[in-house]
Image (cartoon, grey):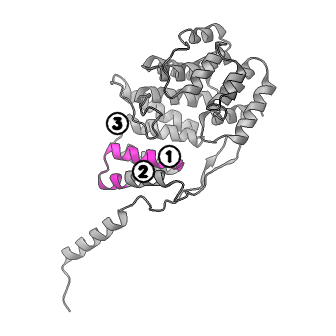
């Protein structure tokens, strides 16, 4: 019996492994349906993907996975994690970013994206640790625009690495009811904002925070630069809320607009407005409606959940 040379065996195994790693746009993707536990103790669950209805997301995920396997650069790891997160498999995305951190520990993007997904699954302490590390890493560095994985209507990215880090750090503190640190983070976010979209995003949270801290004059100052001719591409809900706070929009105009009616951001902003205007029962009703009908991964939903958990 002839012996097969070792080199041939090795090549055969390598080819076999490479074949197993190849993916196509139609490959099935299995998700972990339990993603976490809400602040109120409710399971955060997702459904398995539908091969037809979710074909675009699946195709994008498989492309990102193939790119990562063939060339695990920092960019390819980031996109593999992002495409995984767009499937709502946040736990797997966190694992991918964690592996990226081990290879590229000085790349702030991994902490920024992992921190974002820690917020999604309600692990706020871990999110704050990640964003704090990201702040250290971007110190004295030039800011860069972050490409969109889900492009807006003009396919024009509006957020940057620095603004995203400060924004999400502020949000994590806000969800913990740590208004002092939330205020500081969103102030830094506003300073780093270079376009109207990010200005209204940071200003919206700053206004709410200042009102909750009973700093009404400072909150009013936040509204001063906001006007009706701003160039808003993406953050329309935050913009409309700011106009509502300035009494340039009525509540009916805010909530009956078809493009805004189901927005978690609009619902939370309005509910919060009732809360700091001494109508907690109306705030509670709006937040409960949001929880019943909204998306548990939306920031407005998470903030409403945090509020209701605190008052209970």
Q: Quadrant of residue 262?
A: top right
Q: List x then y, in percent, for residue 297.
A: 60, 41
Question: Which residue is tagged 3?
Answer: 106
Residue 178 position in % (x across, y down): 62, 25
* Viewport quadrant of the N terminus: bottom left
Magenta span dominant secondary structure = helix
Depth check: give the residue in front, 35 or 47: 47
**Residue that label 2 marks:** 60
| Residue 157 found in image quarter | top left
Q: Is residue 116 magenta?
A: no
- Mark 1 — residue? 86
Q: Nearer the viewer, mark 2 or mark 1?
A: 2
Looking at this rendering, what residue extends furthest in the right direction?
Answer: 281
**Mark 3 touching mark 1, by CB under 8 A?**
no
Bounds of the magenta span?
Answer: 66-90
Q: Marks 2 and 1, how far apart in space?
A: 10 Å
Quadrant of the drawing holding the C terminus: top right
The one of 250 and 12 positioned closer to us in this rendering: 250
Percent x, y of residue 175: 62, 31
């Amino acid at each position: 019996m002839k012996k097969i040379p070792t080199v041939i065996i090795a090549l055969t195994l390598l080819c076999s492994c490479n074949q197993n790693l190849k993916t196509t746009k139609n490959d099935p993707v299995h998700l972990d349906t339990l993603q976490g536990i809400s602040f109120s103790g409710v399971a955060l669950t997702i459904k398995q993907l539908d091969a037809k209805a979710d074909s675009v997301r699946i195709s994008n995920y498989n492309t990102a996975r193939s790119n990562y396997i063939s060339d695990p650069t920092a960019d390819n790891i980031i996109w593999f994690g992002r495409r995984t997160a767009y499937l709502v498999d946040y736990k797997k995305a966190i694992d991918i970013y964690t592996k990226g951190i081990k290879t590229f520990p000085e790349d702030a993007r991994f902490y920024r994206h992992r921190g974002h997904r820690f917020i999604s699954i309600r692990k706020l302490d871990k999110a704050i640790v990640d964003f704090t590390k990201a702040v250290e890493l971007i110190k004295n560095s030039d800011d860069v625009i972050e490409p969109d994985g889900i492009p807006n209507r003009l396919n024009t990215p509006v957020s940057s690495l620095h603004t995203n880090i400060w924004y999400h750090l502020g949000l994590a503190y806000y969800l913990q009811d740590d208004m002092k640190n939330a205020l500081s983070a969103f102030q830094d976010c506003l300073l780093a904002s270079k376009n109207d979209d990010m200005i209204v995003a940071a200003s919206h949270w700053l206004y709410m925070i200042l009102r909750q801290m009973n700093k009404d004059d400072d909150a009013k100052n936040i509204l001063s630069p906001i006007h009706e001719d701003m160039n808003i591409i993406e953050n329309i809900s935050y913009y409309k809320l700011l106009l509502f706070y300035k009494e340039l929009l009525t509540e009916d105009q805010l909530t009956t607009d078809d493009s805004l009616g189901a927005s978690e951001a609009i619902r939370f902003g309005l509910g919060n407005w009732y809360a700091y205007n001494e109508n907690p029962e109306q705030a509670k009703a709006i937040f409960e409606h949001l929880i019943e009908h909204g998306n548990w991964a939306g920031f407005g939903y998470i903030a409403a959940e945090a509020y209701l958990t605190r008052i209970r």
